[in-house]
Amino acid sequence: MKIAVTYENGQIFQHFGHTEQFKLYDTDDSNILSEEVVSTNGSGHGALAALLGSLKVEALICGGIGGGAQTALANAGIRLYGGVSGSCDAAVKALLAGNLGYNPNVMCSHHDHASGEGGHSCAEHDCTEHECGSHTCNGDGAGHTCEHHCH
């Protein structure tokens, strides 16, 4: 299996959409066979899932990740292990051993939601309802425009 981890100085980088590097691991059932660090070449949010897909990644370990990126990863067939922190190498070893602590309901935790018309707030609904970036909120069906930034 090929595993990618958001990477910065040996640690799991906590903002998927802003990661500048991934550490890639080729593994068998229980061992790391090879590893390398690759640059994202400035790719952001939506392009990162495509980059991982082109690298034949099957699983991603990361910290925070927004709903749009989660959807893109799911569409690319990449399993997500989010909400993880600490050493990249230790996380991959824990995943291979079947005891990685992760959050299956991880959400982007660095949103800047602004109130829309009539007191509607994007914070009334979760990120899984829409893509990252500027969007039309689905919270009350009134079509309020809100700013939404995932990392």
Image: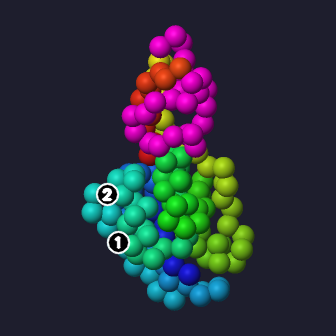
Label 2–label 1 contact, CB within 8 A? no
Task: Specify the amino acid type for callout 2.
Answer: Ser
Coloring scheme of the render?
Answer: rainbow
Spatial CA distance of label 2 from label 1 is 12 Å
Residue 56 lies, in percent from the top left, at 45, 77
- 15 and 140: which is toward the camera: 140
Q: Which residue is mark 2?
A: 43
Q: Which residue is mark 1?
A: 38
Residue 135 lies, in percent from the top left, at 43, 33
- Front tag of 2 and 1: 2
- 126 and 29: which is toward the camera: 126
Residue shown at 51% from the left, 40% from the top: 130
Number of other residues with Cα within 10 Å of mark 1, as a class: few under 14, some 14 to 19, many 20 or more: some
Tell me the number on the disc at residue 134: none
Q: Secondary structure at mark 1?
A: strand
Is 150 on the left or on the right of 39, as rendered? right
**Span of residues in magenta:** 117-141
Residue shown at 38% from the left, 66% from the top: 51
Please say if 43 is above or below 5: above
Residue 77 visible, this angle: yes
Number of other residues with Cα within 10 Å of mark 2, as a class: few under 14, some 14 to 19, many 20 or more: some
Residue 52 lies, in percent from the top left, at 43, 68
Task: Specify the amino acid type for callout 1.
Answer: Val
Position of the N terminus, as image quadrant, is bottom right
Residue shown at 59% from the left, 66% from the top: 79
